[in-house]
Amino acid sequence: MNMKLECDLSGIRKCMMSGLSLLLAGVLQAQNPIVQTCYTSDPAPMVHDGTLYVYTGHDEDHADFFWMQEWRVYSTKDMVNWTDHGSPLAIESFDWADDRAWASQCIERNGKFYWYVCLHSKLTNTMAIGVAVGDSPTGPFKDAIGRPLYEGSWDFID
């Protein structure tokens, strides 16, 4: 009987600790948020020459679904002070695209910066991957190939 009671109390303790953790998570606030002025999504980091760059989508205010028309770049050298580099890349940068500036990732290769992005292709009415190129991690960026790198499915958007 004592063994069963001890097991039951153990379960209650776990449940109470989980509840307490959830309660505290709601009370605690971020001490150093990177972005405070707009909605962002899908942050993608890249370190170059001692600077951390974070590439994000920008979700528009007052939308009832994901309404992203551009991507943004933020950087830091110390994880405390952040610089907002604005929006060096938007859907309009791709003549073949018309909607959904979703997840992205930037990489450096041979002194050029390649920003791979998910967006909607008006050519096939499907999701696609585009690639933009720039000479700096903060752009400006332009469509590298003038067409989707790949298109056809939602399965690869993130």
Image (tube, rainbow, N blue to C red):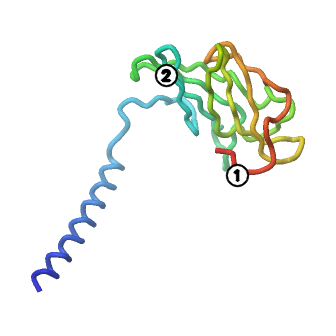
The residue tagged 1 is 155
Residue 119 position by quadrant: top right
> Residue at 68% across / 45% down in the picture?
157
Q: Is residue 60 left or right of residue 24?
A: right
Question: Is there CB contact under 8 Å for labels 1 and 2?
Answer: no
Q: Is residue 19 left or right of residue 119?
A: left
Expressed as whole percent of the image width and height from the top left, the position of residue 21 reads 29, 54
Looking at the image, which is closer to me, 61 or 79? 79
Residue 73 position by quadrant: top right
The residue tagged 2 is 52
Establish if 137 lies above or below 102: above
Expressed as whole percent of the image width and height from the top left, the position of residue 131 reads 74, 29
Element assignment for label 2 = strand
Residue type, label 1: Asp
Tell me the quarter of the image containing the C terminus. top right
Expressed as whole percent of the image width and height from the top left, the position of residue 22 reads 34, 55
